Each structure stands twice: as C-alpha cells, then as structure tokens.
Image: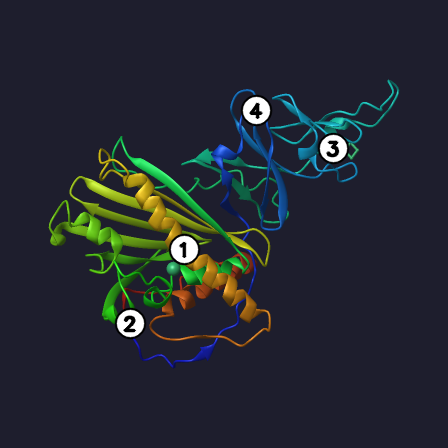
C-alpha cells in the first residue's frame, strides 16, 4: 500500500551478516592441486580440493607469522607454509608438522590451527560458510547450501559476474530495485524510458525474506519475450524470491520449459561487493548460438548495473543522506528491516520477528 509517509531518509548500515553460506569463487578457479584465493566478508581465503576431491577453505594466513598459505605448496593433503614449512591439514586447518621442533620439544603442533571454514561445491561455485564469532566452524547443524532450482535432467547453465565498488547493501537494493530498469537498461530492441507503465505486484513473506508472488511476467521483460515462442502468455508463471543474506532466486515456468537463476551479491569487504548470476534453462537447447547470444545480452545488462554502481560510489564518497520512497523502494526497506530483525533476534536470543506480516500489493511505474 502506498500510504506510508514517503521520503524518509534511511541509514545504510554496512554490517555484513555472519552465519551464512556465501559464494566464494567459481569451481573453475581451482584446477588439480592448485590453490586459489578469494576474499569474503573481509577475510582472505585460500581455497582448493584435496586428493579425494573434497573442497576446503582456510584463512589465507599462517598462524605462525601471517604468511599467506596460498604462497606455499599443497600435496593434496596438507598445505605447507613457504616461510618455515609448518604444515596444515587442508580439511581441518590443524597443524600436522613444525619442522624446526627437536625431539624433546613439548610444543604440540596439533593444538595449533589455521582458520578453517566449511566449504562445499554446488552449481559451479565454492560456497563457504562464514560463522558467527565465537562459534568456531559454525553450528553443528549447518543450513543447506543455497541451490539453483533445476526442473529437468538436461539444461544449459551459465555464470556472469561483476565486481562493484559499493557495499553489498547498495548492490542488493540495486538488485531488487524495480525503478531503474527503463533508465539503466535501455535498449532499442527491448524497452526505453517511453515504455514505462504502471505495474502492480503482489508480495508475500517467506522465511527470512519475501516473494514476488506467481505472476505473468512483465510484457517488456526479456524472458517473457523468449517464452512467448514456446507457449501462450497465460501459461507462464514467474516468482522472484529474496532471502537473507543476499539471495535472489527467479523462476519462470511454462509447462515443461523453465528458466531459473540464483543471483547473489557477496560482500568482499565493507566497500566492495561482487554480483554473481548463475542461470539455467531448458529452452533452445538445440538451437545454435543461444548460449553466446544470451551471454552477450546478459553481460551487457550486468555491465550497465556495474557501471551505475561505480558512478553511484563516486556520489556516495561524499556521504550524502539518502532516501527510500514508497512503493518503488519498499523492497529495499524490507531488506533493511529483515537484516535489522535478524541482528536483533541474534542479539536478544528471541525468535526472528518477520517485518512483513501479510501479503502486500506494491504499485510503481517502470
Ligand atoms: S609463517 Fe608460516 S611457518 Fe612461519
Ligand atoms: Fe539492474
């Protein structure tokens, strides 16, 4: 509803949420015994796969004197620091050898650990769980790694990424912002600022997030135009979910045909984030050039967002006060409220108080 007072300046708090799985880097970044590095929530990581193919992520810092472990060797079991040769088990970070110790030394290497994070590969990514402080590697029962919804055995999958010089908060609210499309993503073959029209969408609460309820996609959206080749418009249904900390899942179903994407905006540091779009579909699998053409337009789209965030970062350097308006910025308000509610429930130990109590209709022009 649009009766809330508009133009309330909102503080953008750059707190990064711990206690979640985050995309650290693409699976293709690690080949064989090679080690790769990543930055996640300000933490330097060294990521790899052991001799049995199990992925691991350690803090890229030797507990002895801080040498990056990624500079050293790896034999498929243990990482060897390049400074004094201490060795650490890849799967646990436990120190297994200190070469300088004499036989009568009382120091027990096994009591020393390099920081170790739960790490799993899914849908072409190394996902790393960043625990809350004081929780070691995290709760005994970790939540499942977020997955891309897949609806058939065979599909085409692709990944697009862009790094942006803003906090993940700005990346996330940019991602859920419906009003920038006609200005940032103009294209003669798709839409222009003259194609702006009023839209009305139903939203509902889901655990730790909200859903844009099943609807026929906007007639000026690209997937809609593609699916029209396959089926009549009424049969097309799409949902878009946002869940904390940074997950946007879009699903479009049209009979046996489907398209899904899982987009994340990952905090690299407080001031930098990376957007990763992993999309899969079972349309046009036998039509040549669909993947390169989809990637061409996808890249162009994401580059428009990246460039916009880069320019916005220039403006944000001067610490302007900002505003979020109804209804177009309501999803952004919900994002901050969800984040606040989570921080609050963790602080007090009280149950999570969902800021969205019931389905809501939002209206805007885009
Ligand atoms: S700094 Fe790594 S072994 Fe000394
Ligand atoms: Fe965009």
User: Which of the two discs, 3 and 4, labels the residue nearer the N terminus?
Assistant: 4
- Secondary structure state at the residue bearing disc 1: loop
Q: Quadrant of residue 269?
A: bottom right
Residue toward you, 170 or 93: 170
Rate crowding at label 3 as few (under 14), some (14 to 19) or many (20 or more) other CA atoms within 10 Å.
Answer: some
Find the distance from the CA under tag 1 to the CA under tag 4. 34 Å
Find the distance from the CA under tag 2 to the CA under tag 4. 51 Å
* Circle on res. 305: none
Q: Which residue is mark 4?
A: 50
- Secondary structure state at the residue bearing disc 3: loop
User: Which of the two discs, 2 and 4, labels the residue nearer the N terminus?
Assistant: 4
Answer with left or right where residue 334 lies relative to residue 36: left
Q: Which residue is mark 1?
A: 208
Q: Which residue is mark 2?
A: 364
Q: Is residue 243 visible?
A: no
User: Which of the two discs, 3 and 2, labels the residue nearer the N terminus?
Assistant: 3
* Circle on res. 112: 3
Find the distance from the CA under tag 3 to the CA under tag 4. 20 Å
């Amino acid at each position: 509803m649009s009766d809330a007072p508009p133009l309330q300046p909102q503080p953008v708090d750059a707190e990064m949420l711990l206690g979640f799985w985050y995309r650290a880097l693409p699976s293709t970044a690690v080949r064989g015994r090679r080690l790769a590095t990543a930055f996640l929530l300000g933490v330097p990581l060294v990521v790899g796969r052991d001799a049995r193919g199990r992925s691991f992520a350690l803090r890229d810092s030797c507990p002895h004197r801080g040498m990056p472990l990624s500079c050293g060797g790896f034999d498929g079991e243990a990482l060897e620091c390049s400074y004094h040769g201490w060795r650490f088990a890849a799967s646990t970070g436990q120190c297994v050898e200190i070469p300088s110790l004499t036989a009568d030394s009382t120091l027990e290497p096994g009591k020393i650990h390099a920081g170790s994070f739960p790490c799993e590969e899914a849908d072409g990514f190394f996902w790393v769980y960043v625990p809350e402080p004081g929780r070691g590697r995290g709760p005994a029962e970790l939540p499942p790694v977020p997955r891309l919804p897949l609806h058939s055995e065979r599909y085409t999958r692709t990944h697009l990424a862009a790094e942006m010089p803003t906090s993940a908060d700005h990346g996330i609210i940019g991602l859920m912002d419906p009003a920038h499309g006609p200005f940032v993503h103009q294209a003669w073959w798709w839409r222009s600022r003259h194609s702006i029209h009023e839209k009305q969408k139903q939203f509902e609460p889901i655990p730790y997030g909200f859903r844009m309820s099943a609807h026929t996609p906007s007639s000026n959206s690209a997937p809609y135009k593609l699916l029209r080749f396959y089926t009549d418009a009424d049969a097309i249904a799409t949902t878009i979910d946002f869940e904390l900390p940074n997950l946007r899942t879009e699903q479009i179903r049209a009979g046996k045909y489907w398209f899904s994407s899982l987009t994340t905006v990952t905090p690299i540091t407080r001031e930098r984030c990376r957007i990763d779009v992993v999309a899969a579909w079972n349309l046009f699998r036998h039509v040549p050039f669909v993947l390169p053409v989809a990637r061409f337009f996808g890249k162009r789209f994401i580059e428009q967002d990246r460039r916009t965030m880069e320019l916005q970062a220039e403006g944000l350097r001067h610490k302007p006060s900002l505003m979020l308006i109804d209804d177009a910025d309501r999803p952004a308000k919900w994002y901050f409220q969800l984040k606040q509610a989570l921080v609050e429930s963790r602080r007090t130990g009280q149950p999570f108080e969902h800021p969205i109590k019931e389905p809501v209709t939002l209206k805007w022009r885009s």
